[in-house]
Image (cartoon, helix red, strand yellow):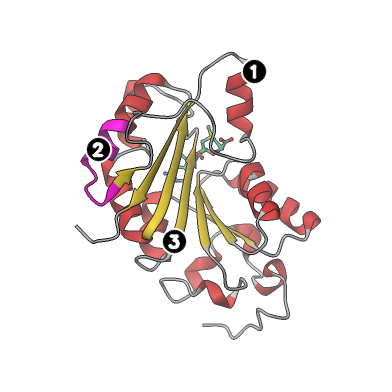
Amino acid sequence: MRDLPPDKLPVWEAIPRLELGDWWKEEDLPIDWDRFLKPGPTKLEIGYGGGDFLLEMALMEPSARFIGVERFGEGHRRLVKRMMQEKALNVLPVMGDAYILLNLLFADSSLHAIYVNCPDTWPKARHASKRLLTEELFTIAARKLCPGGSMYVSTDDAPYAMQAAQAFSKTAALESSHPEEQWLLKSPYPTETRYELKWRREGREMRYFIYRRKQERV
Ligand SMILES: C[S@@+](CC[C@H](N)C(=O)[O-])C[C@H]1O[C@@H](n2cnc3c(N)ncnc32)[C@H](O)[C@@H]1O
């Protein structure tokens, strides 16, 4: 493991391989995020696309640290460039598949929030097995969230929302923060994601979920 002085260097200087996105391969796992980011509640966005939401959230909440996982290289490089321009010291993106990275990079009970927004680029039946809003992902997410930590999900696709609702209901370690409603129609976020804006402009209705990790392990 390299010996870096994280308190003195911004993340983009501390990790020379940041632009490649696979910098985590040189680290002991799970990652000790304190080596790169100031201590604070750790929040993760899965599938950050171009990184607009992640960066915006990080700039709005400087006392928290925002980690992103994305498998789209162009989006990753776009975010790295923007975080340097904005001098955002509390953002750290990683490139790769969310199922693998969520399992490997994060200690159990270490995350305060997980966001998955508009994850289904191609909502075709043949892509169903590749989808992110599955019981499998929610089960891993529940393990990685701290007790009381929340998982936020949004989608514009009605069948996919139904699939997410069913997957959430099967994930015993998570409980709904809106038990009277299957999903929310009003955004719980202080900002919008790129796709959310796009879908709203096209007149599509968004659906949001917030699920909390139960205090007790089940
Ligand atoms: C439609 S885009 C939405 C981007 C952004 N969240 C937004 O709302 O503007 C979906 C993103 O999820 C990413 N994604 C889908 N499955 C993924 C996976 N298994 N691991 C990492 N990223 C994934 C895609 O690469 C894509 O960038």
Q: Which residue is mark 2?
A: 169
Q: Of helix, strand and loop, which one carries label 1?
A: helix
Q: Spatial distance from mark 3 to mark 2, Cα to Cα?
A: 21 Å
User: Do the residues bearing badges 1 and 3 touch, measured as CB atoms within 8 Å?
Assistant: no
Which residue type does callout 1 highlight?
Arg
User: Between disc 1 and disc 3, whose residue precedes?
Assistant: 3
Q: Is residue 121 magenta?
A: no
Which residue type does callout 3 highlight?
Leu
Residue 18, compared with residue 210, is above or below; it is below
Give the magenta part as a residue range. 165-174
Q: In the shown orientation, is residue 25 left or right of residue 12?
A: left
Which residue type does callout 2 highlight?
Ser
Query: Magenta residues: mostly which secondary structure?
Result: helix
In the image shown, does 215 or 104 lie closer to the viewer?
215
Q: In the shown orientation, is residue 4 left or right of residue 122?
A: right
Point out the image quarter for the C terminus. Answer: bottom left
User: Between disc 3 and disc 2, whose residue precedes?
Assistant: 3
Q: Which residue is mark 1?
A: 201
In the rendered image, the residue lying farthest to the top is: 203
- Residue at image location 31% in from the left, 59% down from the top: 143
Q: Which residue is mark 3?
A: 111
Packing grade of label 3 (10 A; few <14, some 14-19, many >=20) is many
